[in-house]
Image (cartoon, rainbow, N blue to C red):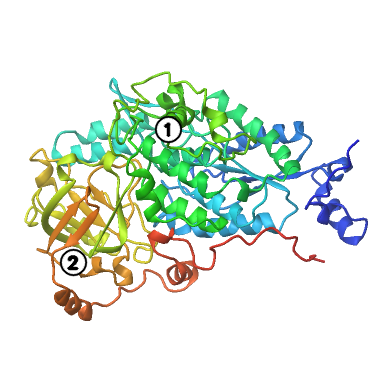
Amino acid sequence: MTERKKLRSQAWFGGHDKDGFIHRSWMRNQGHPSHMFDGRPVIGICNTWSELTPCNAHFRLLAERVKRGVLEAGGFPLEFPVMSLGETNLRPTAMLFRNLASMDVEESIRGNPIDGVVLLCGCDKTTPSLVMGAASCNLPTIVVSGGPMLNGHYRGGLIGSGTAVWQFSEDVKAGKMSLEDFMDAEACMSRSVGHCMTMGTASTMASMVEALGLGLPQNAAIPAADSRRNVLAHMAGRRIVEMVHEDLTLDKIMTKANFENAIRVNGAIGGSTNAVIHLIAMAGRIGVELSLDDWDRLGREVPTLVDLMPSGRFLMEDFYYAGGVPAVVRALGEQGLLHKDALTVNGRTLWENCESAKNWNEEVIRGFDRPLVEHGGVAVLRGNLAPDGAVLKPSAASPHLMKHRGRAVVFSSIEDYHARIEDPALDIDETCVMVLQNCGPKGYPGMAEVGNMGLPPKVLQKGITDMVRISDARMSGTAYGTVVLHVCPEAAAGGPLALVRDGDQIELDVEARTLHLHVSDAELERRRGEWTAPEPAMKGGYQSLYVEHVMQADKGADFDFLVGCRGAAVPRESH
């Protein structure tokens, strides 16, 4: 019999001294037999289950399925909780706590007898926060996403989570939908366990996990309610034990090639703009250089192939039945748009996993000869209004607004917007450019999903459904419109966005990748002299730490002191 490699967990469980006695004895009160401490891999199951995070409320069952696989493969599964970030309930925004949760994950992994990790991710920020924390430790790691909800159905048609909310809310303001009908749609949208079934941020990040090679094939799209989601969790439990024996650590998978593959997959699926921030932050934790320029360079010529809301017609359940991410990867690979030799967690390359994938529905996953949008991806804009960049999602924007010049109507905060947007006296029409300030990482704080500002009722009542909107905020991946986001530097940090005034002319040219404020440098300097930074929303506590250390969106909005991989060396003894 081959002698087992001495694993990290044996620093806790392998000794025959006082410390070994302590570590084993207290674990035994849970009923673990002595042979569980014999040197087999200890697998930490990092669980973001919470009843306050509805997308992740089924994770107790998912964790049990992972445990079955770990035990079957000869490992010792131990589940541990970390902060759960629910986009739907957590205020002022789940993004404020992404970095905090990543610290929870990192220190929980490093401080405990863990040899490999399974990350249970679902709602938007749980995926990047768990991957960021694990990347800073660099142990063998596999991601199991919770899966999307079943398709929403309302009065004979499909409705998508998030996307329907934005659409119906605007229809109510325009007088096209009654409040009673609006309320009736509520239960029709969210009808099973799982996260948003549109190509929102949760579905996007699950797809990014698969494209990065961090999850098993079909991780992204299997519905949460489908029995095959439990099978995938079981197989992930088996595989993580093998990864520990193979010493297949995250740095061997989270390579620049895999990040470049993910960027192109994001373009092809019409993924969320939030993926830009999250992937840059994830790359920073493992030591890979990734920038906005990479997003523009790699995604600019990638067509959007997947016809899913908010860009298109279908939902994630349809995407799974059509072939999911593997079918998209195959289409990209056949066009020479992939690093085919990029390694994945199952020990095979991305191309080996996907080269035979079938596309079962060419309406849902279109071919290169008839894409949903010819140039998809994420457009990175620069100019005197966004010296360090801003982003726009072409597949969700209106073609007639991709080149536009208009008069600025400025809202100094989200409260100012809500106070004035429905005022009939507001001097605004469809040719104007709506500008929202002080909603970035420092300004909100946390960079909330408020960038897709609803249009004024008097514009909606004219049948207009889109206007150019610009902010330092984010928007939900389920949202749509000609919305310029992530303007850097943000207003609260003294960026040019803070200096925009009502009546200024702003010019957007997506093809040229420019965003220009038609105000002279001299006038901007005069305004800068009058500018004062806004008071923080809270003094002291975590929010003060956040505002002091958060980097700008183009750097992934991570904390400056968290960038980099600190490894998982065994800490000194506790007794």
- The residue at the point 77 percent across, 39 percent down is 75
Q: Viewed as shown, does residue 129 lie left or right of 109?
A: left
* Residue 77 seen: no
Q: Viewed as shown, does residue 457 lie left or right of 322?
A: left
- The residue at the point 34 percent across, 51 percent down is 449
Q: Where is residue 325 in the image (x, y as percent from the top left)?
A: 47, 31
Q: Viewed as shown, does residue 94 lie left or right of 157?
A: right
Secondary element at image label 2: loop
Q: Position of residue 460 (x, y in %)?
A: 13, 42
Secondary element at image label 1: helix
Amino acid tagged 2: Val
Q: Considering only vertical position in the picture, is 462 above or below 97?
A: above
- The residue at the point 30 percent across, 45 percent down is 393
| Residue position marked by numbered label 2 in the rendering | 500
- The residue at the point 30 percent across, 56 percent down is 390
**Mark 2 closeness class: few <14, some 14–19, many ≥20 residues within 10 Å:** many
| Residue position marked by numbered label 1 in the rendering | 332
